[in-house]
């Protein structure tokens, strides 16, 4: 079977929210991991939600949260923050993976409140509270992540029904619910949060205010309550204890840096623009508001409304004032790509890469626009960009590399390079935990790659780490491993 027949057709759509929104319903409005069409708004406990990967938002989150991570002894470079739409929740899987709902971000009044919540979750992470949930948690998390990963890949392939079934069966938020902590662990996380915030020169006031502002949620029935308050029950005594210790700290009256406040509002505007109905953005960011944040949100909303000309006019106006902002160029490339103006999209994405060369997902966007032009020379350039993106982002927990490998497979296939196309498909399968298909495609790649070349050895490594059969091992030995 040829690589093109073996791998699903790749929908030629831009990566929303700088790359990817993975919608977990069978309808998959626009195309799973490359979704750029409107996502229907859901309530706090509503429909299947969506994973987000966005360079700009990720940078802002790390700028806010890294001081607390460092204070807790965590290396921020090792920490992944996974964003999930339409969830008012935060959780930690371990001391390197945090899950954060966009509704929670949107409900924070300032950076200090979000920083406080994440410092609390850091307390859970540093205390390895999730690991202490017992064997049920350990047994359930691995198949959950694998099922979710397969659902994401099905979405990327345009297989809406399959993706909906996989994502639905992953019991995603049921798993988050299993991360609920004991009252003792909650109290320890509260106290650890105050320690981390004080050590990093920040106030714990935001955490106290956030808990106090939203604790009325606990009086609602289970069906109406935000999940955060199911997983993190908050009593009046707990808030009083938290406030007393927070007020004793020297940095209690410290305020957020104005630049960070602005970035926090940009993050919220972008999330509203991309994840809420466009009218929500138009209502919140009215036409007479000429701030950067409001103009940015309206440009995204125009794009979501498929008002391409209005979106491009709004984006060009922003670029006239902020020509060195890589994310505005990225948005322009996304809008142009969606409008099938791939050469113009390539130029816009090239600007974003030139301005932010260390961001792997921007390279992936650029490569996608190149691959879509069906030009062998462009395919060569796309391969360079994709290999660079993979090299920049070796940790593929959030799926960026798997999509890069999909594009690599398509680029190599367009050039008739069957060995590297198969190897790229094997890498993609391996990245999402589909070891059977990873092994199959790696074995096929070896048939075309020069023996003992680095890529040939990489294909062999994939086979050996993917539970090879006796027949596989015999075939490896026949060709010298």
Image (cartoon, helix red, strand yellow):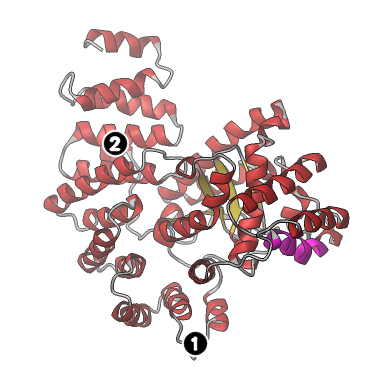
Give the image quarter of residue 201. Answer: bottom right
Is residue 209 within the magenta segment?
yes
Give the image quarter of residue 437. Answer: top left
Q: With respect to residue 313, does 161 lie above or below?
A: above
Looking at the image, can residue 442 be seen?
Answer: yes
The stretch of residues the image draws in magenta is: 205-216
**Residue 57 spot, x, y in % from top left:** 47, 60
The residue pinned by badge 2 equals 424
Number of residues whose C-alpha sits closer than 10 Å to that of mark 1, classed few (under 14), some (14–19) or many (20 or more)? few
- How far apart marks 2 and 1 lie (CA) works out to 47 Å
**Residue 310 spot, x, y in % from top left:** 37, 83
Looking at the image, can residue 104 be seen?
Answer: no
**Residue 455 spot, x, y in % from top left:** 22, 27
Q: Judge by depth and name the residue closer to the eye, 8 or 211.
A: 211
Instruction: Name the residue rendered at 43%, 44% in the picture.
Output: 399
Number of residues whose C-alpha sits closer than 10 Å to that of mark 2, classed few (under 14), some (14–19) or many (20 or more)? many
Q: With respect to residue 392, does 112 lie above or below?
A: below
Is residue 290 within the magenta segment?
no
Q: Which mark is residue 278?
A: none
Give the image quarter of residue 459. Answer: top left
Helix, strand or loop status at disc 1: loop
Q: Is residue 270 left or right of residue 452?
A: right
Helix, strand or loop status at disc 2: helix
User: Which quadrant of the figure contains the C terminus?
Assistant: top left
Instruction: Name the residue rendered at 52%, 72% in the picture.
Output: 258
The residue pinned by badge 1 equals 289
């Amino acid at each position: 079977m040829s690589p093109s027949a073996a791998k699903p057709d790749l929908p030629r759509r831009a990566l929303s929210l700088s790359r990817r929104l993975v919608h977990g319903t069978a309808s998959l409005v626009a195309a799973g991991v490359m979704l750029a069409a409107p996502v229907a708004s859901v309530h706090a406990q509503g429909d299947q939600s969506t994973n987000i990967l966005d360079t700009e938002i990720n940078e802002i989150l790390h700028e806010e949260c890294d001081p607390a991570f460092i204070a807790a002894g965590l290396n921020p470079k090792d920490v992944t923050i996974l964003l999930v739409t339409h969830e008012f929740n935060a959780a930690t899987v371990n001391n390197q993976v945090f899950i954060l709902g966009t509704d929670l971000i949107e409900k924070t009044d300032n950076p200090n409140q979000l920083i406080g919540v994440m410092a609390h979750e850091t307390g859970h992470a540093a205390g390895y509270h999730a690991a202490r949930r017992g064997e049920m948690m350990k047994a359930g998390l691995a198949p959950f992540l694998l099922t979710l990963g397969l659902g994401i890949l099905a979405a990327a392939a345009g297989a809406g029904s399959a993706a909906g079934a996989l994502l639905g069966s992953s019991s995603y938020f049921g798993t988050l619910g299993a991360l609920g902590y004991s009252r003792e662990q909650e109290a320890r996380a509260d106290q650890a949060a105050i320690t981390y915030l004080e050590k990093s020169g920040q106030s714990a006031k935001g955490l106290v205010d956030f808990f106090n502002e939203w604790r009325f949620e606990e009086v609602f029935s289970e069906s109406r309550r935000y999940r955060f308050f199911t997983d993190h029950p908050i009593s009046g005594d707990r808030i009083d204890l938290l406030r007393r210790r927070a007020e004793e700290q020297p940095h209690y009256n410290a305020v957020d840096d104005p630049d960070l406040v602005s970035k926090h509002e940009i993050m919220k505007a972008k999330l509203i623009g991309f994840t809420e109905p466009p009218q929500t953005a138009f209502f919140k960011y009215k036409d007479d508001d000429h701030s950067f944040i409001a103009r940015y949100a309206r440009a995204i909303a125009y794009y979501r409304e498929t008002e391409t000309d209005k979106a491009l006019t709004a984006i060009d106006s922003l670029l006239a004032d902020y020509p060195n902002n890589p994310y505005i160029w990225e948005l322009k490339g996304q809008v142009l790509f969606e409008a099938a103006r791939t050469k113009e999209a390539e130029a816009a994405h090239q600007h974003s890469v030139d301005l932010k060369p260390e961001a792997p997902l921007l390279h992936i966007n650029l490569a996608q626009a190149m691959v879509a032009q069906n030009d062998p020379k462009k395919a060569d350039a796309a391969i360079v960009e994709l290999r660079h993106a993979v090299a920049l982002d070796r940790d593929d927990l959030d799926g960026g590399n798997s999509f890069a490998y999909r594009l690599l497979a398509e680029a190599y296939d367009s050039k008739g390079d069957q060995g590297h196309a198969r190897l790229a498909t094997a890498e993609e399968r391996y990245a999402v935990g589909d070891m059977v298909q990873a092994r199959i495609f790696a074995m096929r790649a070896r048939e075309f790659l020069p023996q003992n070349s680095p890529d040939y050895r990489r294909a062999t490594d994939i086979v050996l780490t993917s539970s090879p059969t006796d027949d596989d091992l015999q075939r490896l030995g026949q060709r010298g491993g």
